[in-house]
Image: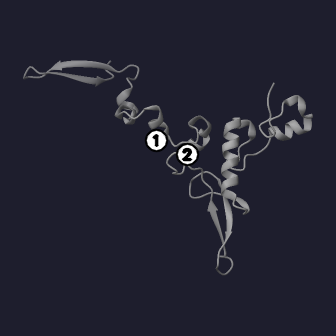
Amino acid sequence: MSMCKICLKGQKQHNKKLWSLHQTQICAFCSKGSGEHSWKLWQIHNLTVESGRQGSKLYPITVGFARTCIARLVGCNADPPYDKEFIPIYMECTECKLYLGSTEEDFADVLDGMCLKCFRELIGQTDYWYDMPPAKKIWKEGVRTWQYCDSKGKWHQMYGNFI
């Protein structure tokens, strides 16, 4: 039996119209549907919106090339049209209180609201090996090694696709 993420009731406790309405609910934080969220992620996003709202109206904004986020409208002590300012609402890391990136916001339920750095420290994934570029770690299919001896008798190894 599937559970509603909005009211936490079962599908049988809804009529068809209410069930379809609750399943197509749009998240105020990321503008995705409730079907694209886990229950925990839905709660985290709603908590972020309510804590950032502070009694103001919310509007969607896009800063630079970033994806669309929400912002609260704040009045300033200036002449119109400069008397209104949009303050973006971002999600904070639960450990270091820095703001999360878009990938970390999407996986906040898995990372428990932490940034990747704090999560890696929590699980002990802090070795230098994890910071190396993938090309140095992975042997690609078809790459062969070839050894040769130079004029001084020293052996060398070459990597590449030799046919």
Tell me which label, 2 or 1, sits earlier in the chain. 2
Q: Nearer the viewer, residue 105 or 118?
A: 118
| Residue at the image position 42 percent from the left and 32 percent from the top | 125
The x, y position of residue 114, in whole percent, is 54, 42
Name the secondary structure under disc 2. loop
Q: Quadrant of the N terminus?
A: top right
Residue 78 visible from this viewpoint: yes
Image quadrant of residue 137?
top left
Please state which of the two labelled residues, at mark 2 or mark 1, is closer to the viewer: 2
In the rendered image, the vertical position of residue 42 relative to residue 10, given as above or below? below
Looking at the picture, how far across and down is residue 71, in whole percent?
66, 59
Q: Amino acid at mark 1?
A: Lys
Residue designated by label 2: 94
* SS for callout 1: helix
Amino acid on which disc 2 is placed: Thr
- Position of 110 with respect to 53 (left or right) is left
Residue 152: image quadrant is top left
Mark 2 surroundings: few (<14), some (14-19) or many (≥20) residues within 10 A: some
Residue at (51%, 45%) from the top-left corner? 95
Residue at the image position 69 percent from the left and 79 percent from the top: 80
Q: Is residue 6 left or right of residue 49?
A: right
Q: How many marks?
A: 2
Say whether residue 75 is left or right of residue 5. left
Q: Nearer the viewer, residue 39 or 135?
A: 39
Q: Is residue 150 above or below residue 85?
A: above
The residue most toward the bottom is 79
Q: Quadrant of the C terminus?
A: top left
Name the residue nearer the viewer: 95 or 76: 95
User: Which dot marks residue 117?
Assistant: 1
Q: CA distance from mark 2 to mark 1?
A: 12 Å
x and y percent of residue 58 in the render?
Answer: 72, 59
Q: Position of residue 104 (x, y in %)?
A: 56, 42
